[in-house]
Image (tube, rainbow, N blue to C red):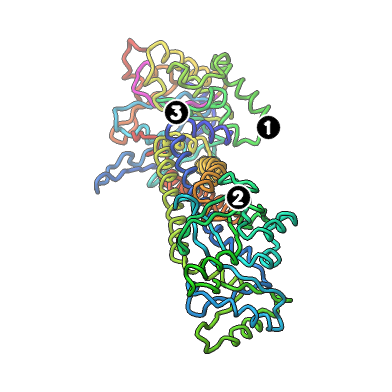
Amino acid sequence: MNPDAEAPVLVELEGVRKSFRRGGETLPVLEGLSLRVRRGEFFALMGPSGSGKSTLLHLIAGLDRPDAGAIRVGGVEITALSEAELTAWRARRVGFVFQFYHLIPVLTALENVELPLLLTGLDRRRRRAHAELALELVGLADRRGHTPARLSGGQQQRVAIARAIVTDPPLVVADEPTGDLDRSSAGEILDLLEGLCTNLGKTILLVTHDPRAARRAHTVRALDKGVLTDAREALDPQCR
Amino acid sequence: MLGKLWIRNAARHPLRTALTLVAVGVAILAFGLLGTLVEAWHAGVSAASANRLVVRHGISLTFSLPIAYRERIRTVEAVRAITHMTWFGGYFRERKNFFANFAVEAHSFFDLYPEYRLSEEERLAFLRDRRGCVIGRGLAERFGWRIGDAVPLQGTIYPGVWTFTVRGIYSGRDRGTDEKQFFFHWDLLNERLKERMPPRANRVGIFVIEVHRAEEAPEAAIAVDALFRSSPAETRTETERAFQMGFVSMSAAILSAIRVVSLVIVVILLAVVSNTMIMSVRERMREYAVLRTLGFGPRFLAALIGGESLALCAAGGVLGTAALYPALALLERGFGAYFPAVAPPAETLLLGGLACLGVGALAAAVPIRAVLATPIVAALGRVG
């Protein structure tokens, strides 16, 4: 189950702190958290609602900034980047998969997948070719002209995965990707994510409530009250 | 891709987009109509000749001048030619059929006003018939009058029904020339007045004089007024442009009000488009957050939102401008008697275009700021 123990570290957090202000009160979410994820690792993060797992994912993906501590991804200290640099870094280095897919409803499946390639400088023909290849990888080449409204939840999530990998980023972050899907569709999505890791060498950072999803990961950690613990052993044996 | 997003985003709420387009179109139409109206008001000033001077009663235009002044004015060296005009103020059958009508000195009038083009044959026919009249082409079209038709005018200042025969139809030398006027022989008017109202006879409304060169106009004006200083009917002589400007100045408050209304229209336009854009952007806040997540920066988002706003305003502006021409034609049918035919001035069209672009840019500013100021995580609507 474990990835190559010699693989270099892709994601490294040291002493990360994050808190939110709600109604004049400061709520600490992460308190001096440290973490390492190796290149090619499928890493699942579990925890109850409000435990800070999505916050942690957002910090690693450069969508939010910590109050203190350092976050390095692929050797880049992303906490030291300016907003513009961080935006450009996200475009090149991270693919995103959301619980509710977050596809652009006025664009077709192909156009949604093509969207991140607009930032790469590729010409239109090459963009199309890359987007079609990504759609083929997720098994939706025949739905390229469909808008999200004409796709099922599972199909929309597959388009979202194609969008996440079309620029070939080393890191894919997935926030509850199966949370809005039926069991069968959820299984297909997990198969895809697993495939990205094993076949394409992507590092997958998965946030989930679902033990079935977590069991696909090489590493499973639980986050509770700002502290990370190994959760693999705690997974329901029936799900393993 | 940007173009696709502009169009498809605008089409997401067809009714909202259609209503906004109509609002922008109507606002630009109103802006254009008002601008054209102001231009029409100034048309007389624009069409005025630099060589012509108007001599009127020193107190007010409502006072007339003795016809005997004509020969004395003629003695001023700079004067090349002289004619006179008297406001008749009649209407055709009903008061709503109002148009400008003057009693003129038939032999000299058209020599001083070459912008009223009349064939030699028609001019001679008019001179031969003391009951004849010359009308503008626009007036002929309005009432369907043709050469030889008898036209009864109901007098207001000069009571009674006055029947004239159309002997000539003039056309304007250029577009700004008023083609809706009616001219007849002052001799006829004077003859009747001698019979019915002798104290009002032998008097004219204004003299129009032509000087050899435009530079002589100021001296000629002083010389003419000097002739009648301390007389019972002192004169005030001014260039035709100044005379026409006097009419416009009388309406200065109305013109100012029109300009204020034009400005208010632009503000309303801004409110309407801003409202549409704010609603649209609020609904798509999560989509913009996704785009930011994918690595699209502030410039792309500004182009996406600003472009949609500008496209909306531009499309509405084109609709409004396209509607301006038929609307002006309709207005001309209803109020043509009061204004010469005037095309929308280039300045108004340009201002309308700039107003559209300005409103498009301003209406997008607040939503763009809101999108960029909202943290991505908050906009995605999920904080774990």
Residue A209 inside the magenta-drawn segment:
yes
Disc 1: which residue:
A123
Q: How many marks?
A: 3
Q: Nearer the viewer, mark 1 or mark 2?
A: 2
Residue A123: x and y, percent? 68, 32
Which residue is pictured at 68% across the width and 83% down the height? B76
How busy is the neighbourhood of tag 1: few (under 14 within 10 Å), some, or many (20 plus)? few
According to the image, label 2 marks what residue? B138
Residue at point 48%, 67% (across, down):
B196
Give me the residue at 48% from left, 29% from top.
Answer: A104
Which residue reaches farthest bottom? Answer: B230
The residue wearing badge 3 is A102
Please state which amino acid type lies under the numbered disc 2: Gly
The C terminus of chain B appears in which quarter of the rendering? top left
User: Label 2 lies in what chain?
Assistant: B
Given the image, on which type of amino acid does mark 1 rest? Asp
Specify the subunit that label 1 lies on: A
Q: Kindly report which numbered mark, 3 or 2, lies closer to the viewer in this rendering.
A: 2
* Camera-nearest residue between B160 and A92: B160
- Distance, label 3 to label 2, CA atoms, is 64 Å
Q: Is residue A86 visible?
A: no
Indicate left or right for B360 with B114 as reference. Answer: left
The residue positioned farthest toward the front in the image shown = B195
Instruction: Please give the range of residues in magenta.
Output: A202-212
Name the one closer to the observer, B186 or B169: B186
Taking the image as shown, residue B175 lies to the left or right of residue B35, namely right
